[in-house]
């Protein structure tokens, strides 16, 4: 009893102390509120902070928290102004003028300037396919013109019908950052995360392999419109977001069920139906277009520097087998999707796909031999902490072996894989030959915005797909201002892609999220975002 009375006295003293502080600040004790914390288990460990240096999901989602964009897509996949207040297009459609919203500030309190945005666009374009095509249409970086602190222009030398769409990309957007940061060398990762987004990254609390922390940005000025997909007002309604890395899905699921965490980005797909039966949980599909899984070969080194070896992969991969292993639940995946540009999108096509609809290991062996493959070890990166990727990679390894490939399996955590895959070292010197990843959302449906489809050689995403003919076809597509005419050009683009094979589509599925029922305002934004969420 004495111990109980002591605890009670301490509790009363604590309440009295809070009340005293509140009175000293000129407020009543009733308005003193505890910090609202949202705890989320994310799909991988955050080790890279530069969203222009890596296209890994975790890095892009980090970007959406701390940075903002000039434009953003709404739920109809229409680009809408975000940091931009107003913009205009000249009658010849060769000059675009952009004026920023008043009062925008970086998270260090300094004002956002047009010069910052131009520097950010330059950095983004060095890595992004849409940005590269935009700069080409501009005739180089001299096409940017800074008018004053709030206004800049993009001046084209040749038609480019997707200027605003490029700036509003969802999967690899043009995140804005201060000029002093954005102007750094593109081959060096940025470590300063000063942004103008709804949250601030707490670098002093960052624990790679365990936790990343974000707090509400007091300088952020949200738009007045209601949130709609990635557009509209990004209002931070919790004080603090904690990203937790739990490589074991069962542990994460148990934590969600127990209320120890609030949000689970990638719950095991074979548990989705079970979670739907739990009244304390909600399951939500935030990306209705879905996720495209892919096999990405390294085009720099044999055998996949030869298009015939990449074509061999098309004969090996069976999408239904992949999806059975990855998803299991037939209601969540397609048995077969023949397009590079997402089934159920406006650019869906089966052009060029027919020869590869049926698995043929004998044909794969023949093509590998024609490519000069003689049994050398093929380095396959297999993640230890991404169950879906691991399952797909296991199927791929079996398919490679049935095609006569000598497989060298490198089992690594996903964060290490994202770092290793960025290296251009030879496979036997710390590099790689092949790995599996995925992408989702409206960007995939665009021949230009699809970051893994970009075949601009050294400027392409990791794997460095290289096909100037394919790039030329995409250029012509992007230069066409008429949407109907662009649509008619997609077949020719995909036919060429099934020759050069930048990657192999391995299936399309949806990945719902799961969260506690006391969360309100979770957005169907294509990717997990943490603004607009209230914790009741």
Image: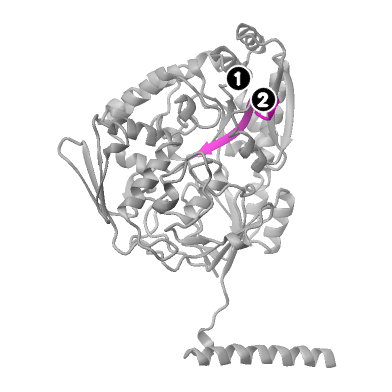
Q: Distance between the residues labelled 2 and 1?
A: 8 Å
Residue at (48%, 67%) from the top-left corner?
237
Quadrant containing the N terminus in the rendered view: bottom right
What kind of element bears circle 2? helix
Image position of 440 (left or right of 401): left
Q: Can residue 241 be seen in this view?
A: yes
Tell me the magenta residue range: 428-440
How many numbered discs, if any? Answer: 2
Mark 2 in CB contact with mark 1 (< 8 angstroms)? yes
* Quarter of the view holding residue 112: bottom left
Instruction: Locate the C terminus and report the quarter of the image it occupies.
Output: bottom right
Choose between 202 and 429: the one closer to the eye: 429
Residue denoted by label 1 = 301
Q: Quadrant of residue 454?
A: top left
Vertical placement of residue 113 versus 43, above or below: below
Please tell me which residue is depicted at 61% across the width and 6% down the height of the picture.
Answer: 370
Query: Is 20 drawn above or below residue 458 in the view shown?
Result: below
Q: Label 2, on which residue?
A: 427
Q: Is residue 516 left or right of residue 118?
A: right
Residue found at x 41% / y 45%: 174
Tag 1 or tag 2, which sits nearer the N-term? 1
Q: Name the spot of residue 427 as percent of width and height, x first.
A: 67, 25
User: Looking at the picture, does residue 183 appear above or below residue 93?
Assistant: below
Q: Is residue 408 left or right of residue 166?
A: right
Residue 284: in magenta span: no
Q: Position of residue 215 (x, y in %)?
A: 53, 65
């Amino acid at each position: 009893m004495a111990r109980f009375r002591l605890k009670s006295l301490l509790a009363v003293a604590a309440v009295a102390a809070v009340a005293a502080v509140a009175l000293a600040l000129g407020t009543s004790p009733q308005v003193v509120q505890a910090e609202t914390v949202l705890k989320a288990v994310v799909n991988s460990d955050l080790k890279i902070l530069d969203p222009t240096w890596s296209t890994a999901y975790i890095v892009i989602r980090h970007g959406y928290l701390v940075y903002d964009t000039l434009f953003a897509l709404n739920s109809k996949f229409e680009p809408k102004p975000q940091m931009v207040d107003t913009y205009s297009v000249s009658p010849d459609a060769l000059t675009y003028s952009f004026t920023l919203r008043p009062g925008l500030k970086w998270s260090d309190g300094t004002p956002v300037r047009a010069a910052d945005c131009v520097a950010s666009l330059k950095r983004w374009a060095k890595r992004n396919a849409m940005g590269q095509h935009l700069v080409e249409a501009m005739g180089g970086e001299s096409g940017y013109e800074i008018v004053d602190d709030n206004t800049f222009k993009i001046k084209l030398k040749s038609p480019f019908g997707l200027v605003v769409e490029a700036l509003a990309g969802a999967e690899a957007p043009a995140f804005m950052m201060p000029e002093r940061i954005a102007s750094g060398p593109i081959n060096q990762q940025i470590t300063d995360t000063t942004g103008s987004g709804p949250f601030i990254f707490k670098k002093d609390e960052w624990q790679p392999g365990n936790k990343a922390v974000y707090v509400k940005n007091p300088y952020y000025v949200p738009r007045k419109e209601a949130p709609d997909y990635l557009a509209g007002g990004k209002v931070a309604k919790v004080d603090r977001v904690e990203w937790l890395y739990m490589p074991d899905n069962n542990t994460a699921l148990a934590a969600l069920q127990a209320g120890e965490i609030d949000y689970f980005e990638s719950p095991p797909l074979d548990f989705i139906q079970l979670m739907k039966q739990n009244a304390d949980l909600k399951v939500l599909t935030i990306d209705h277009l879905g996720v495209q899984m892919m096999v990405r070969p390294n085009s720099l080194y044999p055998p996949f520097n030869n298009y015939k070896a990449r074509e061999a992969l098309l004969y090996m991969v069976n999408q239904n087998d992949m999806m059975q292993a990855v998803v299991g639940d037939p209601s969540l995946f397609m048995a077969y999707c023949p397009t590079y540009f997402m089934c159920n999108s406006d650019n869906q096509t089966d052009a060029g796909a027919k020869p590869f609809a049926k698995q043929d290991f004998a044909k794969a062996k023949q093509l590998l031999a024609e490519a000069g493959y003689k049994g050398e070890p093929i380095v396959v990166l297999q993640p230890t902490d991404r169950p879906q990727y691991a399952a797909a990679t296991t199927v791929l390894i079996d398919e490679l072996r049935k095609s006569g490939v000598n497989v060298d399996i490198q089992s690594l955590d996903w964060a290490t894989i994202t770092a290793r895959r960025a290296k251009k070292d030879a496979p036997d010197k710390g590099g790689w030959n092949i790995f599996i990843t995925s992408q989702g959302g409206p960007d995939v449906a665009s021949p230009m915005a699809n970051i893994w489809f970009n075949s601009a050689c050294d400027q392409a995403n990791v794997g460095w797909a290289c096909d100037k003919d394919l790039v030329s076809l995409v250029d012509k597509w992007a230069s066409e201002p008429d949407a109907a005419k662009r649509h008619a050009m997609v077949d020719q683009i995909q036919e060429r892609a099934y020759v050069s094979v930048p990657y192999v589509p391995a299936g399309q599925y949806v990945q719902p999220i799961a969260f506690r029922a006391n969360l309100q305002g979770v957005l169907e934004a294509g990717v997990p975002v943490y603004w607009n969420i209230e914790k009741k």
